[in-house]
Image (cartoon, rainbow, N blue to C red):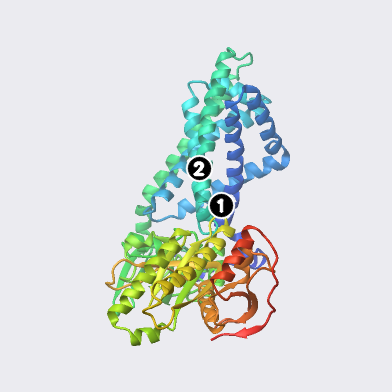
Amino acid sequence: MSAAPESARRPGTLQRALRQKIPARLRDPLRWRQATGIVLFAYATTHLLNHALGNISPDALAFGAGIKWAIWDNPVGTILLYGSLAIHIVVALQSLARRHNWRLPGTQIIQIATGLAIPIVLFPHIVATRGADILLGEQVGYDRLLAEIWPAGALLQTVLLTFVWVHGCLGIRQWMQTKPIYPRIAAALAAVATAILLLAFTGFVAGGRAVVANGPTKTPIPQEVFDASQATRLAVIASLAILILYQVLKPIIRRRRRRVVMHYDNGDGTTRAVVTARGGTVLEASRQADIAHASACNGRARCSTCRVLVLKGHDCLVDPPNAGEAALLKKIKAPPDVRLACQYRPSRDVTLRRLVGAGEIYDAATLADPYRFGVEREVVALFADLRGFTGIAERWLPYDVVHLLNAYFDRVSRQIEAHGGKIDKFMGDGVMALFPIGRQSERSAREALYAALKILQTVEAMNRENAAEWEAPLRVAIGIHGGPAILGQIGGGTHGPLARTALGRTINVASRLQDFAKAQEAALSVSADIVELAGIPRDGAGHRRIAELRGSTRAIEVVVFADAASLASALAMAEAPATLAAGGNAVVTTG
Ligand code: FES
C-alpha cells in the first residue's frame, strides 16, 4: 500500500478550526476516559454497596436498590451513566486499536484484560434489566433477576463484580497516584475497596439464599429476555474476537505499510536505528527494541519523563501534538522540538534523543520506580548544624573530632527517629531529617519541633558531661520548614545504591532558616506556618521575625527560639494553651 503524500496528512481546515475552537482539555481522550471512568466507578460503588445491604436483610437490599435507582434511573442519571459507558468504551477501543506494542506493566495488562472481559457479562446483564424494561416493558428488578440466576448464574455475576471492581480500582489508582495526597491515603483506599468487594460478595450470597428460601418466583422473566441477553453475549464475544483478530493481523498489515526509521541519538556520538511501522509512538518503538526509556506514568501524558528532543525530521504541522501532550508540554514550557515519546507518532524518519533516562544512566530495572524521576510529597524538613565546629576541628586531634561527631550524630539520630523523622543525610557537622506529613500534618509539625527540642537538650547534656574537658560548649543551630518537596533517587556512576533525598523550595527554606538561626544567635528558627500547625498559640513563646532569606524572593514569617527552654515552654503551651507575651516583629536579612 503506498503512503499518502505528506501534504495530505496535514490537518484540514475543519480540523484546524475545531482545534482552535475546542479547548485542549475537551479534546484530550485521556481526560474523557478518566472522567467517564469516575462516573462508572461511582455507579459500580453504589451497585456493590447495594449488594452489601443483602448482609442485613432482603428489605435492606430492596431499600438500597430504591436509593440506587433514585440516583441513576432518571433522565440525568441515565444519560450520565450510559453516555459515560459509551464514551469510555469508544475511547478505550480507540486507544487499543492504536496500540502497536503490548509490552506493558502488569497492572496495565490486568486493566486491559478485565476491561475487555467486562462487556461479555455486563452487556447481557444490561439487556436483561434495562433493555427488557425499555424494549419489552418488562420490569426486571433485583429480586426477580436474583431468583432467576441463583445459584447457576451466581458465579458469572461474581466474576463480573470482581472484574468491574478491579478494573475501576486500577483506573482510580492511576488517576490518583500522581497526586501528593495519594501515599497518605493509598492504604486506606485499598482497605475500603477490599471491604466493599467482600461485603458485596457476602451480601450477594445472603440475598440469593433469601430468594431461594422464599420459593420460586411468581413472575418469572420471559424467555425472550434471556434470548436477547444471550444474543447480546454472542455479539459481544464475536466483536471481541474480531478486535483480537485485528490486533493479531495488525503487524502483518503494518508490514505492508510504509515504515519509519527512528534514529536514537545516545548523546555520546553513537546512534541506534529502530525500524517500525508508521502510526506507533516513539515509546512503543523503544519498548519494541528494548531501549531503556523512562515512562513513569506509563504513557498517560502525565509525567513528561518520556520526553525526547527531535533533532531531525520534526514537523509539528504533519504530526501535531494531541491535546494531552500539548497541555503537558506547555506546562513544562518545553521548546517546540521536544515531544512526549508516549504520544508522538512520527509519520516520517526522525532522529531523536531521550532527555530523561538516556543511555546507561537509567537501566530498565529503575524505570518502574517513580522515585527515580522524582515524586512530590509533603514533608517537614529539619536542618541541624553544629556552630563553630570548624574551630574545634582545627584545634582537636582528628580522632577526637570523629569520635565527637559520631557520638553527637548517634544521639541526635535516635531522637529524630524516635519522633518519626528519617535521616536524609549527614553533611559534615550537619544533619538533614525529614518528617513525612501523613494524615495528621499537625502531628508531623509537632514531632519535628519535639525532635529539635531533644537535639538541643542532647547538646546541653553533652556539654554538661564534658564540661571539664571542652574549652567551650557545643552549640547547635536548627531550621525547620514544611511543604511540598520533590523526593527522588540521586546518584550515578559506580557509587553503589542511589540515595533518596529531597529537593525543592521547602528544603532550601529549611536550610536557610538554619542559617537564620545562626545569624540571630538563636538555637532554632521555624517558619510560622509550622509553629501554628503544631498548635503553638500565636502569642506563645519565641520571637516572631519577618525573614528575607537568601535566594528567596518572598519574605516569610519566622519564629525564633533562643534556647531549649523557650522551645519547651512553647510546646507545653501547645499541649495546654496559655498566653505569653509576644516578641515584636522585625525585618532581618540572612546570608
Ligand atoms: S510516559 Fe509519562 S508522559 Fe509519557
Q: Position of residue 194 (x, y in %)?
A: 50, 39
Q: Quadrant of the N terminus?
A: bottom left
The label shown at residue 210 is none
Nearer the observer, disc 2 or disc 1? 2
Q: Crowdedness of circle 1 by 10 Å Cα count: few (<14), some, many (20+)?
A: some
Q: Pick the residue in front: 154 or 421.
A: 421
Residue 2 appears in the rendering: no
Residue 373: percent from left, percent from top: 43, 66
Instruction: Say which amino acid is labelled 1.
Output: Arg
Q: Residue shown at 59%/35% (left/top)?
A: 49
Q: Is residue 235 left or right of residue 536?
A: left
Q: Is residue 244 above or below residue 181?
A: above
| Residue denoted by label 1 | 33
Q: Is mark 2 within 8 Å of ligand 1?
A: no
Up-down relation of residue 322 to residue 156 (above or below): below
**Secondary structure at numbered mark 1:** helix
Query: Which residue is under mark 2?
Result: 191
Residue 64 placement: quadrant: top right
Vertical placement of residue 467 versus 375, above or below: below
Of the two numbered discs 2 and 1 on the same chain, state the one appearing first in sequence: 1
Secondary structure type for disc 2: helix
Q: Nearer the viewer, residue 268 or 90?
A: 268
Crowding at dot 2, Cα within 10 Å, few <14 / some 14-19 / many 20+, comes out as few
Q: Nearer the viewer, residue 535 or 483?
A: 535
Measured as percent of width and height from the top left, residue 380 is found at 53, 66
* Residue 126 in the image, given as x and y percentages of width and height: 59, 33
Q: Quadrant of residue 546?
A: bottom right
CA gap, disc 2 to disc 1?
25 Å
Drawn side of residue 454 relative to residue 525, left or right: left
Q: Amino acid at mark 2?
A: Ala
Residue visible at 72% across and 37% down in the picture: 74
